[in-house]
Amino acid sequence: MTFKTESTQQFLSIFEEYKERIRSAEGCTQLKLLRDADSPNIFFTYSIWTDAQYLEKYRHSATFGEVWPQVKPLFAAQTEAWTTQALHEM
């Protein structure tokens, strides 16, 4: 997620407020917030879900319904999301 430079602190505050609710959503087993090392206004959320149905359920939850309208106006560029499959873990 690429944020307007002046909006990064507001995003961090929103994430801090909601991170526990997001992490405790049914099926969420891990949640990380990552920041680009070279561009401090670019962030990535990395979450692991036991099944895609739980992620979809979260996307229709009250928590997502509260977070997204607050975060969306802060973006400087269109967001991207990927669902990936682990091929190898060590």
Image (cartoon, rainbow, N blue to C red):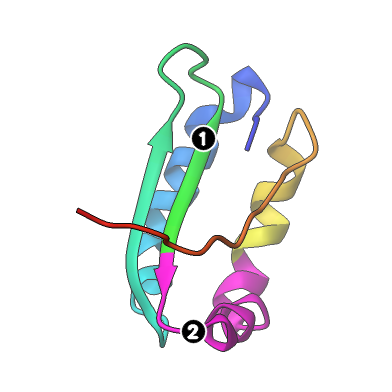
The magenta stretch spans which residues?
A: 48-66
The image position of residue 43, as x and y in percent, is 51, 35
Q: Earlier in the sequence, mark 2 or mark 1?
A: 1
Q: Quadrant of residue 84?
A: bottom right
Q: In the shown orientation, is residue 86 left or right of residue 52?
A: left
Q: Nearer the viewer, residue 88 or 5?
A: 88
Q: Nearer the viewer, residue 13 or 27?
A: 27
- What's the residue at 73%, 43% (across, down)? 79
Mark 1: few/some/many CA within 10 Å (<14, 14-19, 20+): some
- Amino acid carrying mark 1 in the image: Phe
Q: Determine contact: label 2, label 1, CB under 8 Å.
A: no
Magenta segment, principal secondary structure?
A: helix
Q: Nearer the viewer, residue 40 or 28?
A: 28
- Amino acid carrying mark 2 in the image: Asp
Instruction: Say which element carries label 1.
Output: strand
Q: Which mark is residue 66?
A: none
Q: Which mark is residue 43?
A: 1
The image position of residue 72, as x and y in percent, is 73, 48
Instruction: Say which element carries label 2.
Output: loop
Image quadrant in which the N terminus is located:
top right
Q: In the shown orientation, is residue 24 left or right of residue 15?
A: left
Mark 2 or 1: the one toward you: 2
Let me know if residue 84 is in the magenta part.
no
The image position of residue 25, as x and y in percent, is 42, 81
- What's the residue at 72%, 58% (across, down)? 69
**From this viewpoint, which residue is outermost toward the top?**
38
Q: In the shown orientation, is residue 78 left or right of residue 16?
A: right
Residue that carries the numbered disc 2 in the rendered image: 51
